[in-house]
């Protein structure tokens, strides 16, 4: 989920009508709870003891809950990519170099337990993320903070280690969630699914066998921020598979489903929806890719990774595995984001086993190259297994690879991938914020999201720092285009497809055009039952 003072990218402009959200915490609606279905799974495990702790949570499912229950200083508006104040009344850079960021809190803020929210809590929250530095958490988003100062109860000043024009977008993510310093421990995670925040909703959960079976978001009467609630209550129901979730939608048990739908469901709901149900489709910035442990002997030589890039047919993959519900992707920076260019297509052109063979022969690599492709069985949707079978067949049909496939549950997959257990594995990325920086920086350098050993000094030492000095983000595209060309040559990751945003709803639900923001995050406060 893997991260902006920037112009609106095309994808953000297309997501919804260009109306800005206005402040306030009261809204309309019938009072009936809005019920949302999802296949996301929140499970308490040894490696993830507190799935809803902001210092640990770093995936789109958990962030959907955190956005609703915690405040951040800034947040994305209902439409667009320029953050607006939430807990903060105002925020701005205090210097021309984008190295000092100052915020003034709204007056009268308090947590759901009644404790006042002050600048002390803000400093505590940011210091806590850095102190815990959870292995699979969002600490890397905030790693450029040098220190946080609190001149008084309502003033917060961030001093950055280096210029960063994207800092407002970073603190608008749940990594910047403000927690109560009297409730949360400064150097350790909480337990279970308890949430104490100051966001638009409070949270209660039903838990069975260490995982959440139902979550209820109730309107927080003490919320003061920029979100205007259109309902008093939202219920999230969790399903084991997409088929049972779709049946619940058809039966009227839920009002909306978003994550995760099968390609066949999308086609069916688009072409022949059941009575009372409709499918909404919008451009999206989700990407899917293969990640490599570049220290693993099987893929350490970049010629192997280049040969895979030369063989894999993304058009066939999106056709055969996803029913064209997604689009082929030829760069980490997706279409619609500033600086996008098809670097992999430019370098490798059409899939060609003969060109791939020449790459391997030139590096003195014997064929077939043995590979194990690993994917998670329960996080990116049920179509993932089919996609990996397609990838396996493409690689093996070239005669250059002997690829095997293995599926692993997410609770084991994520920590094992971070420890370098897998040579080649499938990952997805929902942007933390829709800026090209957020599609390059998380995968490069010592604090990278993948814990990858891959390093490139040109990208991390020159291009990214230069781009972050550019407040007008459309002018930063040149740096990211260079970075995309380097990645296409060295292939530390291999982009596969770019997702669209799909939401299936029952008729009578209002606000569905605002259901997802520019970062594909759920905005449940926009939804309501018609009168």
Image (cartoon, rainbow, N blue to C red):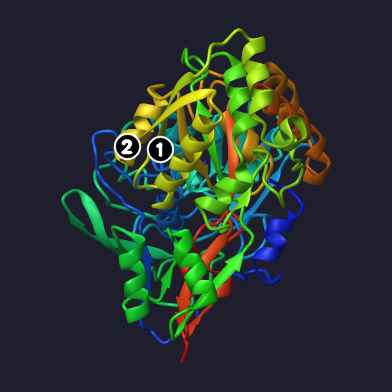
Residue 15 screen position, x and y as percent: 65, 65
Are the residues at dot 1 and dot 2 in contact (C-beta closer than 8 Å)?
A: yes
Nearest to the observer: residue 323 or residue 492: 323
Q: Is residue 371 above or below residue 474?
A: above
Residue 144 screen position, x and y as percent: 59, 29
Asked which secondary structure carries label 2, the reply is strand
Residue 87 screen position, x and y as percent: 53, 56
Q: Is residue 326 left or right of residue 214?
A: right
Nearest to the observer: residue 350 or residue 216: 350
Lower position in the chain sequence, tag 1 or tag 2: 1
Nearest to the observer: residue 262 or residue 277: 262
Between the residue at mark 1 and the residue at mark 2, the CA separation in whole angstroms equals 6 Å
Give the total of numbered labels: 2
Q: Which residue is mark 2?
A: 408
Q: Residues within 10 Å of mark 1 (few under 14, many from 20)?
A: many
Residue at 68% from the left image edge and 59% from the top image edge: 12
Which quadrant of the figure has residue 236? bottom left
Q: Is residue 491 above or below residue 476?
A: above
Residue at 19% from the left image edge and 48% from the top image edge: 210
Q: Is residue 304 left or right of residue 355?
A: left
Residue 304 screen position, x and y as percent: 57, 19
Residue 49 in view here: yes
Q: Residues within 10 Å of mark 2 (few under 14, many from 20)?
A: some
Residue at 75% from the left image edge and 30% from the top image edge: 347
Asked which secondary structure carries label 1, the reply is strand
Q: Which residue is mark 1?
A: 375
Residue 3 in view here: no
Q: Extreme bottom residue here?
A: 531
Residue at 52% from the left image edge and 54% from the top image edge: 322
């Amino acid at each position: 989920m893997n991260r902006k003072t920037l112009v609106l990218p095309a994808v953000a402009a297309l997501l919804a009508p260009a109306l800005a959200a206005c402040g306030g915490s009261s809204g309309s609606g019938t009072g009936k709870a809005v019920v949302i279905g999802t296949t996301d799974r929140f499970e308490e495990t040894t490696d993830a003891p507190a799935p809803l702790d902001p210092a640990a949570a770093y995936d789109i499912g958990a962030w959907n809950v955190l956005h609703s229950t915690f405040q951040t200083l800034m947040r994305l508006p209902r439409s667009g990519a320029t953050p607006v104040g939430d807990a903060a009344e105002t925020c701005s850079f205090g210097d021309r170099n984008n190295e000092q960021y100052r915020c003034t809190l709204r007056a009268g803020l308090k947590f759901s337990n009644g404790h006042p929210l002050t600048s002390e809590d803000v400093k505590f929250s940011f210091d806590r993320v850095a102190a815990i530095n959870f292995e699979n958490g969002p600490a890397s988003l905030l790693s450029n903070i040098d220190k946080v100062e609190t001149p008084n109860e309502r003033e917060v000043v961030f001093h950055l280690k280096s210029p960063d024009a994207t800092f407002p977008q970073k603190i608008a993510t749940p990594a910047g969630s403000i927690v109560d310093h009297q409730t949360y421990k400064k150097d350790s995670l909480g337990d279970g699914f308890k949430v104490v925040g100051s966001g638009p909703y409070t949270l209660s959960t039903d838990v069975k066998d260490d995982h959440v079976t139902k979550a209820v978001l109730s309107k927080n009467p003490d919320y003061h921020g920029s979100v205007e609630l259109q309902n008093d209550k939202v219920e999230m129901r969790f399903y084991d598979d997409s088929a049972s979730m779709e049946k619940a939608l058809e039966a009227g048990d839920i009002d909306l489903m978003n994550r995760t739908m099968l390609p066949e469901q999308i086609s069916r709901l688009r072409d022949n929806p059941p009575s009372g149900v409709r499918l909404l489709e919008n451009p999206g910035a989700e990407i899917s890719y293969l990640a490599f442990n570049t220290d693993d002997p099987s893929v350490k030589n970049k010629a192997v990774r280049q040969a895979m890039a030369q063989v894999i047919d993304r058009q066939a993959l999106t056709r055969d595995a996803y029913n064209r519900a997604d689009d082929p992707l030829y760069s980490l920076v997706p279409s619609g984001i500033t600086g996008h260019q098809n670097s992999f297509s430019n370098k490798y052109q059409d899939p060609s086993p003969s060109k791939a063979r020449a790459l391997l022969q030139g590096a003195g690599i014997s064929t077939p190259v043995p590979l194990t492709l690993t994917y998670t069985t329960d996080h990116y949707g049920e179509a993932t297994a089919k996609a990996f079978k397609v990838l396996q067949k493409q690689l093996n049909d070239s005669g250059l690879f002997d690829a095997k496939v293995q599926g692993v549950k997410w609770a084991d997959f994520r920590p094992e991938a971070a420890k370098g257990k897998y040579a080649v594995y499938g990952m997805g990325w929902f942007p933390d914020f829709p800026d090209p920086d957020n599609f390059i920086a998380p995968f490069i350098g010592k604090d990278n999201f993948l814990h990858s050993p891959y390093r490139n000094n040109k990208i991390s030492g020159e291009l990214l720092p230069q781009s972050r000095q550019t407040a007008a983000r459309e002018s930063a595209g040149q740096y990211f285009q260079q970075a995309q060309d380097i990645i296409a040559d060295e292939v530390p990751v291999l982009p596969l497809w770019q997702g669209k945003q799909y939401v299936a709803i029952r008729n009578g639900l209002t606000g569905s055009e605002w259901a997802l923001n520019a970062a594909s995050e759920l905005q449940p406060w926009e939804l309501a039952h018609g009168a």
